[in-house]
Amino acid sequence: MNHVSKMLGFVLVALVMSGCSSSQDSTSGGSDPGQAATTTPVEEPTGEPTPTVAPAAGETIKVKGMSANLPAEWVAGTASAIQASGYPRTDAGSIMTLFRFPQLLVESLDEQARDNATRSDWDNTLKRQDDVTVDGQVVSHLSGTVRPGEYVDLFATLLDRQQFELEFSFGNGESRAERDEIVQSVLASWRFAA
């Protein structure tokens, strides 16, 4: 019973300390003293993702204005001024590519997403998912099966009169969980440079 009492004491102390910490945090840093303090985090409407996996730890690929890490077991492929790519070391049936284009034909993220969803090189239209925030930038997300055996996740944004895209084309029969882990780890490493 003594052990249980000590554990309950530790839990109560931890709760009190976390409550005090939250109160101090919410009123420090120039907050308006007349504002009510809250300990419930407010989610931004852009849906900033809470990282669920660590950033990809493989080689960094980049084009002017952005970079991303490949998954650890992937290798870099071809690169040019407007694109860089990588693929699994053991099977090149899947590929990840960074693209940069001048923003000549689209004026908004919605227009860019509509254009990307219906690309002529795909048999099927991609479905727009919820936008995400990556490195402080709102990014559209399209996904779906573009032809039998090929699943695509495409992320795109507009920045400094450029279109930036990160495309995953999965053709190695990866499960949804495998695809999600790869995508989330790379997104956690995707950075935009001024």
Image: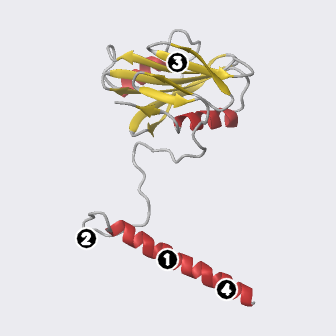
Q: Secondary structure at mark 1?
A: helix
* Label 2 to label 1: alpha-carbon separation: 21 Å
* Label 1 to label 4: alpha-carbon separation: 16 Å
Q: Nearer the viewer, residue 72 or 11?
A: 72
User: Mark 3 or mark 1, which is nearer the start of the sequence?
Assistant: 1
- The answer to whether residue 147 is seen in the rendering is yes
Q: Secondary structure at mark 3?
A: strand
> Where residue 17 is drawn, which disc sits there?
1
- State the residue at coordinates (63%, 31%): 71
Q: How many marks?
A: 4
Residue 7 falls left or right of residue 114: right
Q: Amino acid at mark 3?
A: Ala
User: Mark 4 or mark 3, which is nearer the start of the sequence?
Assistant: 4
Q: Amino acid at mark 2?
A: Pro
> Where residue 6 is drawn, which disc sits there?
4
* Label 3 to label 2: alpha-carbon separation: 50 Å
Q: Amino acid at mark 4?
A: Lys
Which residue in the protein does label 3 denote?
Answer: 84
> Where residue 33 is drawn, which disc sits there?
2
* Residue 103 position (above or below residue 49): above
Image-quadrant location for residue 179: top right
